[in-house]
Every structure is written in structure tokens, then in C-alpha cells.
Image (cartoon, coloured by chain):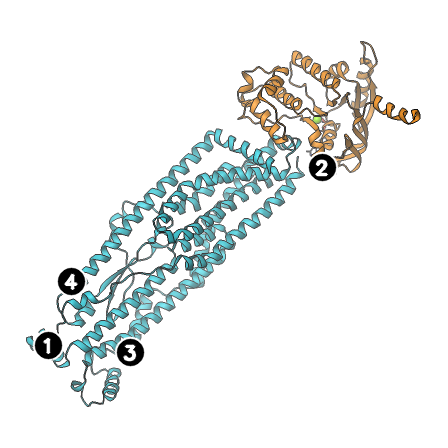
Chain colours: A cyan, B orange
């Protein structure tokens, strides 16, 4: 260990004195700092915008005048998906999934991109986030700084010199890896500060932030080990560089795209139009709750009259139209949920296909661990969709109940002909304020940690396997002097 | 009592064997290079190993340092086998390689300190400066990057490093190549001093005159074994230079 530390110190001094290494390291540190700063600024702005939008639509809803509850059903409201505290580090799928849902009666809408994104879209250059810098650029810098670390010694005859002073191949490899690891830590520092800053405001997020940090440290450790091992196995530094750049291309660029393409083909998602048409057809089969003569609703009327023991709708103690709306909403919502769950199941299956590739490239493992622990993954979006639908259903049913209990059937029937009856169907405005607002409940840090565990384990597996490879490289290097 | 003391006294009188090579056979690649080499160097002795290019001189040193495993025969450095006790052997041996590999971005002082750290040897700055001065590396040059050095300056740095190890056994592979005559003479004076302190020195060289001036014994390696071995005679004409030349010519013919 002492010898390994001496070797590490020598290698670090070499890196610090090499102008090229200093420039590369400086550039990446600057990039990392810029990423941390712009990403947190962007997320803070986005967070504020979404919160402001949510507050505005909540106020608009509350400020509705006295009106017929069914008008409120069609007036609707919006649900915004808020950003978690760690999104500044890793926004995950946030940029690719809609953040705003329009919630109204009888319909389930598609999540849309908020107004904030479009206005700032022109100003943003791709996704320069700390996670991107660490997952994509940092390994490349480590490759350029480390490819020659062992090969150089072999080429110059330095190995003999090292061995004759008592160092063993293990010391040399461990030392070179330690030096590169120190560089990796330095590279990760700005991103780490960004992570700490993001977690500091929400103490409950600290364990999740630690998991995000652990994932990236394991990932960078895997690269450091791979670089030292390949530098040892390669006959020359040039061979090592070619092999390592190829490895980076495959692991970071090619395989993630292959995995995504494969998942899309293996688990095809029906097109939006296709889904909508099928849903419309099934909705038509359910019947039209607005049409009192629809066969399904004729049957509902018979059952309702029987339940209340009356002969005519007019004799019901509640407003039949409100009941019909509630029944219709129950049926359509069940269908919406069924469709949404089917789509979610396909998306989860696709993700499982991609997850399997975590054993083919640590880049996918770290991506998964990071966005899952940070709460910016697909699961978070699906959770938002499900909660928004549950909220929509609850809101509409509360309005339908208000319709059934608070509006007289006779007035309801007469309201288009009789202005006084119409006025009586209006429910006082204070009701709208009493209805609950939408509040997204993200998965707890504990749940996210559990979900991130397999990806973290995969990263641990990578590190363990590469330690084995490095040990193998040491055995081979011991015999070359 | 006296009878028991006698062998002990004899052992003390005859200097201990520091390097013992016997029946050494070693291959490089699949080519046999050493075929039954027998050679020994005593403490306080300078042994010059001569031989044509490719004769296997550097291979012999490599075997002593455990860089390659012999196919047959025995090797011992101060009674320890490089196969069985690699770390111990490398601790007691200072080695000057044929191709000196120093770190270009470090100065001579920093290079020396780095390798001494690696060997676990603590030496003060003044000791390092003294060693570099002894090999006649100018003090200001010793603080410049080795990348700016001439071949001889690198060689001097490596020699200083080997001396600073203060090892009981010195393995030198063509130490004076690249040194100017003045530095060579100075270096031989240093080796002479070390010999006086009981260091065993095995020096591979192509410098016949230098070997004849300094060495206690000169061995000629050819065909994988020692074909000739000369001992220094007392007096100013230590070796028969004509015989050395003849032997060398025969072995390379
Ligand atoms: N690393 C190696 N791999 C394969 N063969 C080698 C290696 N090093 C040396 N050899 C071969 O072993 C033989 C002996 O080489 P060695 O270096 O011991 O010679 P030497 O006596 O030191 O020669 P020189 O005077 O040129 O330094 C040569 O034929 C050489 O080609
Ligand atoms: Mg040689």
C-alpha cells in the first residue's frame, strides 16, 4: 500500500505538470461548474414557473362565479408535475415528458409541455447537467489522462526500474488507479457541490443524494479500473488509447442507443392516434351519459328508480342528471385507468429491457441509479399521471355529487327556458374554494432508494469484476519486465 | 578449542559470497540464452562481465533480479533466492539498468527521491545533493527536468540513485556508456571506495580497459556460459590485456 501511494503520488505529479492534462482537467472542471450552475438555475426557474402556474390555475378555479356544477366539470383545471430537489443534478426524463395535464370531465388528456419550456427553449443548449458531465464527459477525460499510465512505463523500461526498487506489479497498477481515482474525485467535485446544495435544502433527500453520489462514484471507479487494466494489457500506449476510446464509444454512446432501440422494438408502444381511436370506440360502446335515452343509461334509470322505490325521475330525492354524470364518469374513468395502466405496463417493460443492458454497460446502470434515486425517472412521471387521474376523478365526482344533491332536477330541466330556474341551478362560489387542490406526492426517498438498488448493485458488480480484471492484469504485468 | 576456531577464522578471512550463480539456464522467448552459467562475486569484489552483444549479460542480471525465471540452475544473492524471496533480494540489490528510464518531468533530485521513497529508504536532501555531486552532476542541473538532460547526465543520475540505495550488492549494466572520460574515472573511484566498504559489485561492460583497471576478476560470457575468467594479479599490470583481447576475439568469432 505504501508503494502504491508513492506510485500514485508520482503519477499525480506527472499529471499536474503536464500542460495537456492540466488543460483537459481545467476545461472539464469549468464545464462541470457551468453545468452545476446553469442546471440549478434552470431547475429553480422551472420550479418557480410550475409552482406559479399551479397557483394561478388553482386561483382561477377558486375564483369561478356561482355556476352550475356541470359547467365546472367542463371548466376543468390543470395539474403541474413539480421538480424534485435533486432534479438540478439529474433532471432525468423531465425534459422529455409532458409536465402539465389539463383535467376535465369525461376526458383524459395527454401531458403537455408547459409554457415555461417553450419560452426558454431557444436559449438552452441541449442538456448540460452535472449528471451528463459525469456520465458522458468525465470518463472520456479519464481515458485521455490515464491511457498511457501503465503502458508508458512498459514502453520506457520504467517497469524494471520500479520493480528493482521493490514495487510489485500490483503496487504499480494500484498506484496508477489511485492517481486516476483522485483525478476522478476532483472532476466530480463541482457536481458533488451541486448535489450537496440541492439536498441541503431538504434534509429528507440526503439519503437519496448519497445514493446518487454513490452511483456516480462507483461508475467513475469502474472507468478508472478499466483504464488502468487496459493500459496494462495493451502492448503500447497507442493501442491502449485506441482500445479505450472504442470502449467509451461502445459503452457510453452506442450501447445505450442500441438498448433503447431494442426495447422499443421488443415492447412496441401503440401510437397515440391508434390508442385514441380504440378508446373512442370503447367509450361509444359504454353509451353517452348526456343522452337520457341511451340504452345503457335507460337501464341505469330503471335500477335507480327501483333503488329509491319511486316511479318517476322527478320523484327522486336527488337530481337524476347528477347521478347519470357520476355513473358515466365511473365507467369512462375505469376505461381511462385501464388504458393508462396498459401503456404504463408497456413503458415499464421497455425500461426492464433497457435495465438488462446495465450488465453490458455501466453507463446505463449509472443513468438508471441516478434518475431513480433523484426521483426524475419514468416511474415519477407515471406516478404523476396516476395521481393526476385520481385527482381528476375525485374532483369530477365531487362536482357530480354537488350536481345530484345541490341542484333540483326540475330546475335543471327548465334552466334553458326559464331564467329564474337557471339562476337556482347555480351553486354558490364558496364551494369551488372548498374543493381540494392538486398536490403531487412524489415517492419517498426510501422508496426511491429501494428502486435504485438493483442499478447500484449492477454498478457494484462492475467495480468488483473490474477489480478482478485489474488483478489479472497485475499477474500478467508481473511477468513483463 | 583451537580446532573448532580454525574453520571460523578461515570463513572470516575468505570474504562471503554475495552473488552465487550455478548451472544457470535461461531462455528469452523460446531461445536458450544462458546454458549452464557458473559465476560468483564475493563481498568487497568488483566482477566485470564481458561478452559480445546478445551474449546474455543483461539476461544474467535480469535473472538475479527475478525479472525472469530460470529454466534450471541455482541463483542466490546473499544466500537468498530471487525465486523464493523476491522482495528480500530486491531490497539488498541496487540495480543500474542498461536503459535508464527516468521521469522526464521530474528533476534528478525528484527522480532520486521518488525511487528512494519507493524502496522505503529515507535520505536527507544533503545526502542526495552529495551523491549527485559525487557523480559530478552540477547542482543547478540536478534541479532541472530530466527531459532536458544529455545521455551522460541521465546515466549520472541513475548511478547516484544506485549509490544512494547503499545496498550490499550492486548490479551495473554498462554503467559508463555515455560518460565522458573524466566522469568514468570518477565513477571507478567511487566503485573502488564501495569495494573497500565490502560491497559486492557485478558490472556488465564493454569497456575492456576500464575493466582491467578496476575489476578484481573479469569473466567472458559466450555461448551461454563463462568461457574465460581472469583474476587480477598483484602489482600495476593487473591483467594481461593481450590475453583479454585474444579471449574476446575468440569468443566473438
Ligand atoms: N525481452 C526480450 N525478449 C526476447 N528476447 C530477448 C529479450 N531481451 C533479450 N533477448 C534476447 O536474449 C539474448 C540475450 O540478450 P541480452 O540483453 O542478455 O544480451 P547482452 O549480453 O546484454 O547484449 P548487449 O551487449 O547488446 O547488451 C539476445 O539474443 C536477445 O535477442
Ligand atoms: Mg545488455
Mark 3 and mark 4: span between their CA atoms?
34 Å
Report whether B52 appears left or right of A420. right
Out of A113 and A54, give the one closest to the viewer.
A54
SS assignment at label 3: helix
Observer-side mark, 1 or 4, equals 4
Q: Secondary structure at mark 2?
A: loop
In this rendering, position of residue B69 left or right of residue A78: right
Q: Is residue B130 visible?
A: yes
The residue at which mark 2 appears reads as B29
Q: Chain of mark 3?
A: A
The reply to the same-chain question for discs 3 and 1 is: yes
Q: Do callouts 2 and 1 mark residues in contact (Cβ within 8 Å)?
A: no
Front label number (3 vs 2)? 3
Q: CA distance from mark 3 to mark 1?
A: 27 Å
Q: Which residue is mark 1?
A: A415
Q: Which mark is residue A286?
A: 3
- Sequence order check, earlier mark of 1 and 4: 4
Q: Are marks 3 and 2 on the same chain?
A: no
User: Which residue appears at 93% of the width and 26% of the height?
Assistant: B3
Q: Earlier in the sequence, mark 3 or mark 1?
A: 3
Q: Answer above or below: position of A100 versus A403.
A: above
Beta carbon at label 2 within 8 Å of ligand 1: yes
On screen, residue A109 above or below B209: below
SS for dot 1: loop
Marking on residue A63: 4
- Residue B161 is drawn in which quadrant? top right
Assess whether mark 2 and mark 4 are in contact (beta carbons under 8 angstroms): no
Q: Tell which tag, 2 or 1, sits nearer the viewer.
A: 1
Q: Are marks 1 and 4 on the same chain?
A: yes
Quadrant in the picture for the N terminus of chain B: top right
Q: Residues within 10 Å of mark 2 (few under 14, many from 20)?
A: few
Amino acid at each position: 500500500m505504501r508503494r502504491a501511494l508513492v506510485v500514485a503520488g508520482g503519477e499525480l505529479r506527472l499529471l499536474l505538470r503536464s500542460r495537456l492534462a492540466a488543460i483537459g482537467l481545467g476545461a472539464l472542471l469549468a464545464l462541470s461548474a457551468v453545468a452545476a450552475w446553469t442546471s440549478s438555475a434552470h431547475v429553480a426557474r422551472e420550479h418557480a414557473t410550475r409552482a406559479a402556474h399551479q397557483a394561478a390555475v388553482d386561483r382561477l378555479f377558486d375564483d369561478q362565479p356561482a355556476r352550475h356544477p356541470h359547467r365546472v366539470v367542463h371548466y376543468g383545471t390543470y395539474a403541474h408535475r413539480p421538480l424534485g430537489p435533486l432534479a438540478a443534478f439529474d433532471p432525468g426524463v423531465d425534459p422529455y415528458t409532458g409536465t402539465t395535464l389539463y383535467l376535465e370531465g369525461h376526458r383524459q388528456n395527454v401531458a403537455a409541455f408547459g409554457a415555461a419550456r417553450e419560452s426558454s427553449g431557444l436559449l438552452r443548449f441541449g442538456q448540460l447537467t452535472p449528471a451528463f458531465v459525469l456520465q458522458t464527459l468525465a470518463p472520456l477525460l479519464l481515458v485521455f489522462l490515464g491511457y498511457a499510465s501503465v503502458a508508458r512505463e512498459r514502453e520506457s523500461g520504467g517497469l524494471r526500474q520500479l520493480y528493482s526498487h521493490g514495487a510489485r506489479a500490483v503496487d504499480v497498477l494500484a498506484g496508477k488507479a489511485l492517481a486516476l481515482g483522485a483525478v476522478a474525485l476532483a472532476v466530480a467535485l463541482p457536481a458533488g457541490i451541486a448535489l450537496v446544495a440541492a439536498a441541503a435544502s431538504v434534509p429528507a433527500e440526503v439519503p437519496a443524494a448519497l445514493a446518487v453520489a454513490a452511483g456516480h462514484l462507483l461508475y467513475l471507479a469502474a472507468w478508472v479500473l478499466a483504464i488502468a487494466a487496459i493500459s496494462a494489457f495493451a502492448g503500447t500506449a497507442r493501442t491502449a488509447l485506441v482500445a479505450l476510446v472504442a470502449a467509451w464509444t461502445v459503452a457510453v454512446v452506442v450501447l445505450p442507443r442500441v438498448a433503447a432501440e431494442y426495447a422499443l422494438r421488443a415492447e412496441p408502444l401503440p401510437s397515440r392516434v391508434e390508442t385514441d381511436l380504440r378508446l373512442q370506440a370503447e367509450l361509444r360502446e359504454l353509451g353517452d351519459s348526456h343522452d337520457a335515452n341511451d340504452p345503457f343509461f335507460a337501464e341505469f334509470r330503471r335500477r335507480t328508480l327501483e333503488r329509491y322505490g319511486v316511479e318517476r325521475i322527478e320523484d327522486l330525492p336527488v337530481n337524476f342528471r347528477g347521478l347519470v354524470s357520476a355513473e358515466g364518469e365511473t365507467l369512462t374513468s375505469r376505461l381511462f385507468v385501464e388504458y393508462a395502466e396498459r401503456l404504463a405496463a408497456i413503458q415499464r417493460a421497455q425500461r426492464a429491457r433497457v435495465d438488462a443492458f446495465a450488465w453490458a454497460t455501466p453507463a446505463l446502470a449509472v443513468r438508471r441509479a441516478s434518475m431513480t434515486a433523484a426521483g426524475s425517472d419514468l416511474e415519477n412521471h407515471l406516478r404523476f399521471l396516476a395521481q393526476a387521474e385520481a385527482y381528476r376523478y375525485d374532483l369530477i365526482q365531487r362536482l357530480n355529487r354537488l350536481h345530484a344533491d345541490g341542484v333540483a332536477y326540475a330546475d335543471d330541466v327548465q334552466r334553458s327556458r326559464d331564467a329564474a330556474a337557471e339562476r337556482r341551478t347555480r351553486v354558490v362560489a364558496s364551494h369551488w374554494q372548498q374543493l381540494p387542490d392538486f398536490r403531487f406526492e412524489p415517492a419517498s426517498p426510501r422508496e426511491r432508494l429501494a428502486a435504485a438498488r438493483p442499478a447500484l448493485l449492477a454498478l457494484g458488480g462492475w467495480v468488483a469484476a473490474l477489480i478482478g480484471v485489474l488483478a489479472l492484469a497485475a499477474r500478467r504485468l508481473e511477468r513483463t519486465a | 578449542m583451537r580446532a573448532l576456531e580454525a574453520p571460523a577464522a578461515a570463513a572470516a578471512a575468505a570474504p562471503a559470497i554475495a552473488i552465487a550463480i550455478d548451472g544457470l539456464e535461461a531462455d528469452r522467448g523460446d531461445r536458450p540464452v544462458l546454458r549452464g552459467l557458473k559465476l560468483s562475486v564475493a563481498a568487497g569484489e568488483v566482477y566485470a562481465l564481458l561478452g559480445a552483444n546478445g551474449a546474455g549479460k543483461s539476461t544474467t542480471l535480469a535473472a538475479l533480479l527475478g525479472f525472469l525465471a530460470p529454466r534450471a540452475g541455482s541463483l542466490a544473492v546473499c544466500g537468498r533466492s530471487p525465486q523464493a524471496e523476491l522482495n528480500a533480494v530486491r531490497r539488498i540489490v541496487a540495480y543500474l539498468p542498461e536503459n535508464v528510464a527516468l521521469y522526464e518531468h521530474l528533476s534528478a533530485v525528484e527522480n532520486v527521491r521518488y525511487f528512494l521513497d519507493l524502496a522505503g529508504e529515507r535520505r536527507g536532501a544533503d545526502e542526495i545533493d552529495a551523491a549527485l555531486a559525487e557523480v559530478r552532476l552540477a547542482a543547478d542541473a540536478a534541479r532541472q527536468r530530466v527531459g532536458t538532460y544529455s545521455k551522460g547526465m541521465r546515466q549520472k543520475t541513475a548511478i547516484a540513485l544506485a549509490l544512494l540505495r547503499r545496498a550490499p550488492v550492486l548490479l551495473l549494466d554498462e554503467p559508463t556508456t555515455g560518460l565522458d572520460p573524466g566522469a568514468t574515472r570518477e565513477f571507478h573511484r567511487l566503485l573502488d571506495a564501495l569495494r573497500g566498504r565490502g560491497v559486492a559489485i557485478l558490472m556488465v561492460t564493454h569497456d575492456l580497459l576500464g575493466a582491467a583497471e578496476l575489476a578484481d576478476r573479469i569473466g567472458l560470457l559466450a555461448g551461454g556460459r563463462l568461457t574465460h575468467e581472469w583474476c587480477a594479479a598483484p602489482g600495476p599490470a593487473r591483467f594481461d590485456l593481450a590475453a583479454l583481447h585474444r579471449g574476446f576475439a575468440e569468443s566473438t568469432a
